[in-house]
Image (cartoon, rainbow, N blue to C red):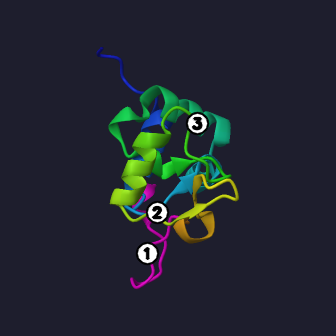
Amino acid sequence: MNEELPAYAERVLEAAERIPPGRVMTYGDVAEWLGEGGPRQVGRVMALYGGGVPWWRVVRADGLPLPGSEPRALEHYRTEATPLRLTAAGEPRLDMRRARWDGNRDPGQDGTRDEAHT
């Protein structure tokens, strides 16, 4: 398929590629970081075009792995040492407080916003 990606989709996928291993952003975080769209638009882009980027780093706000993709996502999270926690029912869930990335450089760097995304 030779179809060109819509510009918004390209920006969403570029944002997903910038999320460091072991960190995540919610669909809403990505939309806010881009300054356009919303969680549903980001989710739609990821559903249609996200297979070639680290899709497991763009997540639901509740920290649950995507239904149907749980085993693959959990494998990536464990490989990347993404912070996880267990629910009361013993199910793994992302520890959003520790795993969430705000689009700034990771701690230990200069703390300035990564402006290369614009």
Secondary structure, mark 2, is loop
Label 1 crowd (10 A; few <14 / some 14-19 / many >=20): some
Which one is in front in this view, the residue at disc 3 or the one at disc 2? 2
Q: Which residues are magenta?
A: 103-118
In terms of secondary structure, what is the magenta stretch mainly?
loop
Give the labeled residue for mark 2: 23
- The verdict on residue 108 being magenta is yes
Q: Amino acid at mark 3?
A: Gly
Residue 116 appears in view: yes
What residue is shown at x 33% (from left), y 36% (from top)?
52
Tally of marks: 3
Q: Is residue 103 above or below residue 37?
A: below
Q: Amino acid at mark 2?
A: Arg
Secondary structure, mark 3, is helix
Secondary structure, mark 1, is loop
Callout 1 touching callout 2 (CB < 8 Å): yes
User: Marks 3 and 1, how far apart in space?
Assistant: 24 Å
User: Marks 1 and 2, how far apart in space?
Assistant: 9 Å
What residue is shown at x 36% (from left), y 61% (from top)?
80
Give the labeled residue for mark 3: 43
Q: Earlier in the sequence, mark 3 or mark 2?
A: 2
Give the labeled residue for mark 1: 106
